[in-house]
Structure formats: structure tokens, C-alpha cells
Image (cartoon, rainbow, N blue to C red):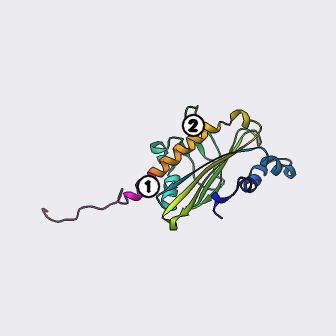
Amino acid sequence: MAVYERTRYEHWRAIAPIFAESHPDARNATRMVTTTMNVIEVFEDIDAPPAVVWDVLLEFDSYPEWNPFVRSIEGDPAVEAELEVRIEPPESRGMTFTPVVVAVEENRRLAWLGRLGVPFIFDGYHEFHLDPIDGGDRTRLLHRETFRGILVPLLFDEQQLERGFRAMNEALKARAEERVQSPTNGSNDTDTNPEGS
């Protein structure tokens, strides 16, 4: 089953253990998580194979050039690595946070978990899923974040964040498709015609 075919409940049950693992009452944590979640998920179909989209997604140094939402990421995309992420949602103050990478599957999935202070105050599980479609020539991107915690009702602005997600998806789509359409960009091909030498 592709990740975008999961129901919302199936998604909650799948990631609840990640949220709950640091909770002191592990017996009740999963139930608590699944009843206090807010989710934003935005899809984008991209005319480029997953490997190309993955390369663009992981080129953190280039984010300031094209990414209107996640303005910068510092760190390595490796499990348990800490990142420094700067986001700037539309019409909202930007913020910088330091999530920990929890999943990396090449050409398939990148996910990190960030939190404000201690667990269950304001936690965010951010995911990028790349599913091949049309025989692998195209990609369906799922960009999703799941929030939970007692401050979510105060800090969670779904409309602003969703606009940011959509803006990033569209920019990622444009950059990946441009790369496919211009495969010689950055190549070392030179004119070897000896005439005039």
C-alpha cells in the first residue's frame, strides 16, 4: 500500500509510537497521541522520477535559492542526526528549530521529529514521501506534518502552514522538472571540433 492510500487513522496509529516513546506513561501514551493530533498533508504530482526529486530535496545548501517555506537546513540527512531548520510560513514570523532525523529511505522518505521544550508540549513530525507513479517516470509527493501537544490549539495555524507546504511543493516540482528537461545542465560537455585550431 502506498503511503498516500492510508487513512488518517492508519497514519496516526503508525506514528504514535514515535511520539510516545519518551512519555513516562507508555501504556497510555499511544491513546493520548492519537486523540490530540493535528495533521497537514499536501500532495503534488511531479513530472520527474523519485531519484531526481530526492536529489533536489536533499540538496540543503540550495534551499535559499528556491524554497519559499523551508528557507534553510543545516546538518546531515542521517537517522539520529540533529538538523537546524528555518521555516518562514506566509504572512507569519519565521522560526528556527532543531529536530532530529528519524527516518531516511533513499528516493522514498525523509522524516524528522521536532519539539518545543519537553515532550507533549508542542511536537511536530515532518515527513516527505516520494511514491513512483506512471511506471516510475513521475513522482507523487506527500508533504505532511503531524502536530500534537497541549500548546497545539494556541500555536497551530493550519491555513498559514498549508500555504507554506503548497508553496514548497510547487517550487520543488518546478526545480525537479527543470532538471529533467535540462539533463545537460552542469555537464562537462565541450566543443571538440578541431577546426580553427
Residue type at tag 1: Glu
In the picture of the structure, the residue carrying the numbered disc 2 is 89
**Left or right of 51 on screen, residue 117:** right
Residue at the image position 63 percent from the left and 53 percent from the top: 111
The verdict on residue 151 being magenta is: no
In the picture of the structure, the residue carrying the numbered disc 1 is 177
Contact? badges 2 and 1 (CB < 8 Å): no
Q: Is residue 117 shown above or below 13?
A: above
Q: Which mark is residue 13?
A: none
Q: Nearer the viewer, residue 102 or 66?
A: 66
Q: Is residue 188 visible?
A: yes
**Helix, strand or loop at mark 1:** helix
**Left or right of 73 on screen, residue 32:** right
Position of residue 196 measured from the top left corner of the image (x, y, whole percent): 12, 62
Position of residue 51 measured from the top left corner of the image (x, y, whole percent): 50, 61
Q: Is residue 61 visible?
A: no
CA neighbours of label 2 inside 10 A, class few (<14), some (14 to 19), many (20+): many
Marks 2 and 1 sit apart, C-alpha to C-alpha, by: 24 Å
- Tell me the magenta residue range: 175-194
Q: Nearer the viewer, residue 184 or 40?
A: 40
Which quadrant is home to the C terminus?
A: bottom left
